Structures are given as C-alpha cells and as structure tokens.
Amino acid sequence: MRFFQQKVKVGIAGVTGYSGEELLRILIRHPHAEVTYVAAREDRHCKIQSIFPYLEGKIDLDCRVMDAEDAARACDLIFLALPHSASMQVAPVLLDRGKSVIDVSADYRLKNPAWYPQYYQFEHTDSARLSQAVYGLSEYRRKDLRGAKLVANPGCYPTASLLGLLPLLEAGIRWSAPCILDAKSGVTGAGRKASQSLLFSEIAESFKAYKVMGHQHEAEIRQGLAFGSAANSPEQPFVFIPHLLPINRGILATIYVTPTAPVAPERLREIYTQRYAKEPFVKVLPDGEFPELRNVNGTNQCHIGVGVRKDTGVVVIVSAIDNLQKGASGQAVQNMNLMYGFDETAGLR
C-alpha cells in the first residue's frame, strides 16, 4: 500500500460539471489532499475562483482545457469527471505516466466491451484496461481498492440499487420473478448541460419516468449483482425504471423482491444490520423506519430501510443517497482514501 508523508496532489478534469464542482468542494477541505490542477471545457483561460466566487480565498488555480500531459506533471492522482467516452482518451496517457486515475464517468465500469455500443452508443478504445479497472463500490471492493491505479467510480442509480440488494444475495436469498427497482433522482443526475427537458419550467410541478424501455445503468446493475452471488449461480432478473424528481439532488430507490422462499422480518433485519454494522457510510434504519432524501443530501451516507409485507411476503428495501455525493463525488473521495491508506472517512461526512 502506498503511504504519503505529504499531501497527495490531485487534479480534477471536468471541474465545472456538477460532479466536478462537488469534488472540488470536498477536496479543498480534505486533510490529505492538495488540489494542484483543474480543467474544464472553458473557452477562456481564467481562475477557478472566478468561475465559482465562493472559492475566493480557499484556492487559487488556473482553469484550463484538459491536457493529459499537463495534468500528469501537476498531479499524483486525477479525477476524471468527463462526459462518457472522453475519459478513455486521456486515462491511458495518465496511467502510462505512472499516475492514478479515478474515472467518474462510465468508461471503465463495464467489464464487457461489447456492452458499450449497446448501452452507451460508442466503441471502447481502451478495452485492454477494462480488466484492470477496479469497480469502486467501496463497501464491496475495499480490498481491491487498496493500492489500485485505475478506479471506475460507480453510477448513482447502481450505487443505491446495489447497496440495497447485495446483502440479500450474500445471504443466499434468491428470486425467480424479476425484482423491481423503482428509482427516483434529482435533476443534477443528468449533468450540467443545456437541455429543454431539464429547464426549471419543464420539471417544476411535474414527475415522470424516463428511459422506461432501457437505461444505460441496467448493464452496471446486472454486472454488480454478481458481487453477491456464488460462482456460476443463475443471474437474478430485475426491472429497473428511473424517474425524474423536480428537486436538485438525491436518489431514492424502492426495491421489491419476491423471494423463492419466505423470509422472516427478523431474519431480513439481521441480514442488513450485520452486513453494514461496521460501514461508516451505510446506516440501516430502525424497524418500521424508511429513508428520506433530506437526511442524506449533502452527505456521503446511504440510508436503508427494510421490511416484509405480511400480505404477500414481498421484501421491500428502500435505499437513499445523495447522487452527487455517495452516487458520484463523495464515493470517489472514499475510494481515494482507500487507495492511499487514509482514514476512509477523511474529508467526508
């Protein structure tokens, strides 16, 4: 494991996006990190504190167009908060220069390169490194993250869904009919971009499902469910339906599972409380309580509530996270802490 006597020099590419800005907010107060490079798709050369005036007095850095060679000279570790398909163009350069990379996009999440044209509409040009990338679901890949050089930070919907479902699979509970992943996200999940469908006047006083016939995160959830399954066990079916909430941030996933054999409420609670008892960022709520977004937003926490319907035996799991923290930037910093042997909670709350 690497050990740094001094602060790790970190860079953020895509700093003006929602995830990039959230990373900067966290890292400027991190006890073991020094932000030494920031880049964005800016048409002007300016100071990052002039783009985000609340940073005045906290940081003084030029914000430039991303250049992998410049980033490699300035940093030990670079966070890539870039649009999908952009990270795989620069990550190889950074890795070849001996730098560490945490990719917040989807470019290294899927182990099967054939899934990229299907789910993301591009061919993967760095498929050789897909097998090297560690999938950064911190609670389930902690050992692999220690000393890793390339980390694929999970998506927001998969994080909420997998933290909710994996304890069942680890406990040997299976289902035959598809489980239902009914998930809702705040609008920042779509990224900071100009789109009519994301305008305030379009989303306010409304609520909708989208990509009902197939969302790109389905592949990641499908892949992630294997973490909790025994080798060669049958794939567990699911239906994932995302919804857009008229709020800024947060994800709440309500998961319905009909197990192949009845599960007692006491056994269900025991499974979750034991699995997450030592996890600093996962809280299993008391019996009869279920999560609210206001209690997780602005934190790296995941709150989980579980129960069994007496009338049908359906297991209900509700998982809530902040899509910009545990669903993106907070988890990325948690992964950095694990990579470098820092206290896992450093810089996070």
Image (tube, rainbow, N blue to C red):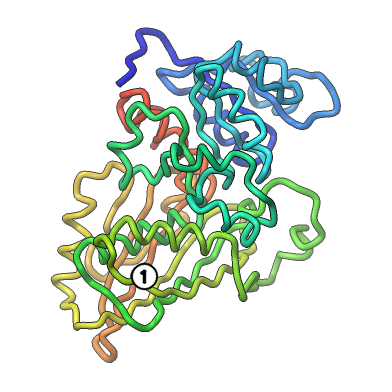
Q: Is residue 281 visible?
A: yes
For the point 65% across and 13% down, which residue is it?
60
Image check: 331 left or right of 307?
A: right
Q: Position of residue 173 (x, y in %)?
A: 23, 71
34 versus 193 height, above or below = above
In the image, 152 versus 164, the foreground residue is 152
Q: Residue furthest right?
A: 43
Q: Position of residue 117 (x, y in %)?
A: 65, 57
Q: Position of residue 216 (x, y in %)?
A: 59, 61
Q: Is residue 285 visible?
A: no
Callout 1 secondary element: loop
Q: Quadrant of the N terminus?
A: top left
For the point 57% across and 47% down, which residue is it?
106
Please give the residue where the numbered disc 1 appears in the rendered image.
Answer: 235
User: Residue 148's image quarter?
Assistant: top left
For the point 63% across and 62% down, which residue is it?
118
3 versus 277 height, above or below = above
Q: Residue furthest front?
A: 128
Q: Position of residue 340 (x, y in %)?
A: 36, 23
Q: Residue furthest top?
A: 5
In the image, 8 versus 326, the foreground residue is 8
70 versus 123 height, above or below = above
In the image, 220 versus 180, the foreground residue is 220
- Amino acid marked by disc 1: Glu
Q: Residues within 10 Å of mark 1 (few under 14, many from 20)?
A: some
For the point 26% across and 44% down, which residue is it?
279
